[in-house]
Amino acid sequence: MKGNDMKKRWFIKILIILIIFCGCTNKQPLSQTQLLLDTQVTITLYDCASSNILDECFAICKDYELLFSRTNPKSELYQLNHQDKTKPIKISKELAKVINIGLEYSKLSNGTFDITVGQLIDLWDFKADTPKLPETSAIAGALTSIGYRGITLNDSTISFSNPNTIIDLGAVAKGYIADKIKEYLIEQGVDSAIINLGGNVLCVGKKNSDDFTIGITDPKGSSDILKLKINDQSVVTSGIYQRYFEVEGKYYHHILNPKTGYSYDNGLASVTIISNHSVDGDALSTVCFTLGKEQGLALVNQLAGIEAVFIDTNNALYYSDHAKDYVIQ
């Protein structure tokens, strides 16, 4: 009897191991979509049938939303932005880390991209049913609050030279979150997945044995203007067609110039960045857009592991040195 009991116990253990193992060797994609981070988030697993893993991915999104959201009153960033900033403030290590990333990219752009545009962004409502231009005086007032150089970050203590400054991490946070989700998936043994945070696309490995095919949207239409073959990398696009409105025949989009307070008007329609880490692609797609085609391409060609596709308002395409290697002909 004891021998039979032992055999049963070993059989149960082996069965449990097989169930767990088979949970991440599924050949049918498992996908889920939720509205989070002020956008549509879709995560698809190609070699794993564990809904628990998918659920945890979305839990990660929700946790980070409570750190980085500028508009959620429960988030740490919101509370930082709306408290007395006349004295140093202690913040979490992770919020400090992402703010520091934003400051580094602000510095890299020499201020054409600036994470302290929060007050300016609040003036522009690109989601309104009947959008309208902010008052000129309101824009002028918001401009006085902008200046990344006025922020000092010492470990987890942040100081502001201007207490009216409002931080916005919209061009950094989604990429950072995507990278964290990818880290979690790899830890769980997932080798093939795609993470799409509202157009911030991050691939885990290949799509089974093939490269992922990622499209770049035609700024003048709804189809793709070209397709990229991507293996274990990130593709992020910033474009004027994503959030915009027209007033009296003039086009206003969400990529705002921190010097003028109005949308950038530099002849570009979009910038797509291919990178190993989504946080870099997220930031650089905006940084390079703000720099314009010539300076943006020059910057990308100096950065290791980064490629870019620029599209101007006439739909002409411009590539960094090795970007065409990713294009599906």
Image (cartoon, helix red, strand yellow):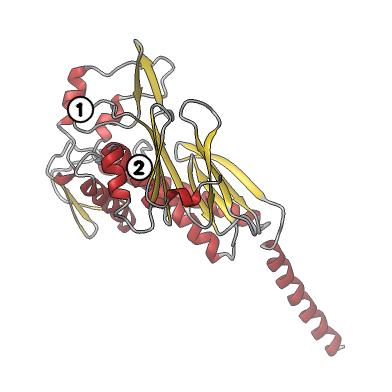
Q: Say left or right for 322 vs 118.
A: right
Instruction: Specify the amino acid type for callout 1.
Output: Thr
Instruction: Answer whether labels 1 and 2 touch (C-beta < 8 Å).
Output: no
* Residue 115 is at least partly visible in this image: no
- Element class at badge 2: loop
Q: Residue at x 28, y 49 (%)?
A: 299
Q: Residue at x 82, y 80 (%)?
A: 8
- Element class at badge 1: loop
Q: CA distance from mark 1 to mark 2?
A: 19 Å
317 or 7, nearer to the observer: 317
Judging by the rendered image, the residue that carries numbered circle 1 is: 260
* Mark positioned earlier in the residue sequence (1 or 2): 2
Q: Residue at x 51, y 60 (%)?
A: 184
Vertical position of residue 110 compared to residue 144: above or below: below
Instruction: Specify the amino acid type for callout 2.
Output: Ala
Residue 163 occupies quadrant:
top left
Callout 2 environment at 10 Å: few (<14), some (14 to 19), or many (20+)? many
Judging by the rendered image, the residue that carries numbered circle 2 is: 171
Vertical position of residue 54 compared to residue 124: above or below: below
Quadrant of the rendering where the C terminus is positioned: top right
Vertical position of residue 227 compared to residue 256: above or below: below
Q: Say left or right for 255 vs 24.
A: left
Residue 191, x across and y down, in percent: 59, 62
Residue 150 occupies quadrant:
top left
Residue 199, x across and y down, in percent: 48, 40
Residue 5, x across and y down, in percent: 82, 84
Residue 110, x across and y down, in percent: 19, 44
Quadrant of the rendering where the N terminus is positioned: bottom right
87 or 99, nearer to the observer: 99
